[in-house]
Image (cartoon, rainbow, N blue to C red):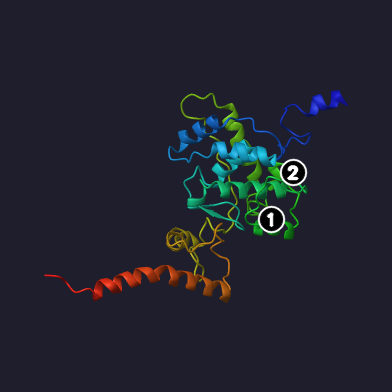
Amino acid sequence: METLDAVFRKHSELEPTGKLSMLGESVCSADRLLAYARRRNPQSPDVSESYIRLGKLYGIRGDVAYCQAAYDTRWWTSELAGPDWAPQVRAQWADEEAIEIRMQMLYALATFRPFPSEAKVADDRQIAHIERSGWRGKAACWEDLSGKWSHSGNVGYGRYVVAMWRGVLEWDGQGVPPKLPVYRQEFTPSVRTAVRKTGTVDWSSFVSEQMKWLLHRQLLPVPAPHPDRKVTWEELAALLRQWENSSRPQEQKERREEDTPDVP
């Protein structure tokens, strides 16, 4: 058996199938991850340490999760990222609570085990979605995320994330990191790619303008819902009431200023 293991497990981090397990320890340091990211985008947020630390808490490979986030956000340059059923806006990418929610989703996809006792499940809607979809424990390896975390058209999603992680591992730490292969992704309408046809909505402009407007006024829930998700009358009423309450102090201030006579 040891001889067979030596043949099939040519890489210490790989499963016998050749895939990279979701659960495990980080190999890359936080400094190396950040340095690699900032060679590509100098404005990349300093969150690599959070990924390593929270990854250790959940038993998830935090360095690969960091690379996954970099892939999702195009090195932190997109407006919206993450799975279509639980997207995150740019303002959440450096938020530790949002990073922990990502770890919890990955953990739920990777295993049936209960969450660690130290875990703080702030929002279980994503976990409920994973369970309703029958995905709980069905992505033991990063390559298994295709069609679950990513849309069904991106069949190579998990492989691309692992390839990015290998790029960080193989980088010599000098100069600009080597360019990763350009992967062809099948076109599938999603929140990131607007469908420009008669009778459809250009979600790219919606995300960049309308979602920003809501976010600026703190009217978006956290994590932000998918822009295409329908809103119930009850949710609409709560949103309007929140907006009314937030704008009332400003209106009262303006009214007082109007009532105050000008002093010559």
The answer to which image quadrant residue 12 occupies is top right
x, y percent for residue 2: 85, 24
For the residue pair 229 and 29, the one nearer the viewer reads as 29
For the residue pair 81 and 181, the one nearer the viewer reads as 81
Against 190, residue 142 (above or below) is above
> Would you say 217 lies left or right of 65 here?
left
x, y percent for residue 218: 46, 61
Please name the residue that numbered disc 2 is placed on: 140
Q: Looking at the rendering, in which quadrant would you find the C terminus?
A: bottom left
Q: Secondary structure at mark 2?
A: loop
- 1 and 2 marks in contact (CB < 8 Å): no
Tell me the crowding category of disc 1: few under 14, some 14 to 19, or many 20 or more residues within 10 angstroms, Cα based. Answer: many
Q: Is residue 86 visible?
A: yes
> Would you say 103 lies left or right of 135 here?
left
Identity, as a three-letter code, of the amino acid under mark 2: Ala
Please name the residue that numbered disc 1 is placed on: 127
Q: Looking at the rendering, in which quadrant would you find the N terminus?
A: top right
x, y percent for residue 23: 71, 39
x, y percent for residue 10: 75, 26
The mark that comes first in sequence, 1 or 2, is 1
Against 17, residue 156 (above or below) is below
> Would you say 258 lies left or right of 220 here?
left
- Checking the image for residue 174, the label placed there is none
Q: Secondary structure at mark 1?
A: helix
Q: Is residue 181 visible?
A: no
Tell me the crowding category of disc 2: few under 14, some 14 to 19, or many 20 or more residues within 10 angstroms, Cα based. Answer: many
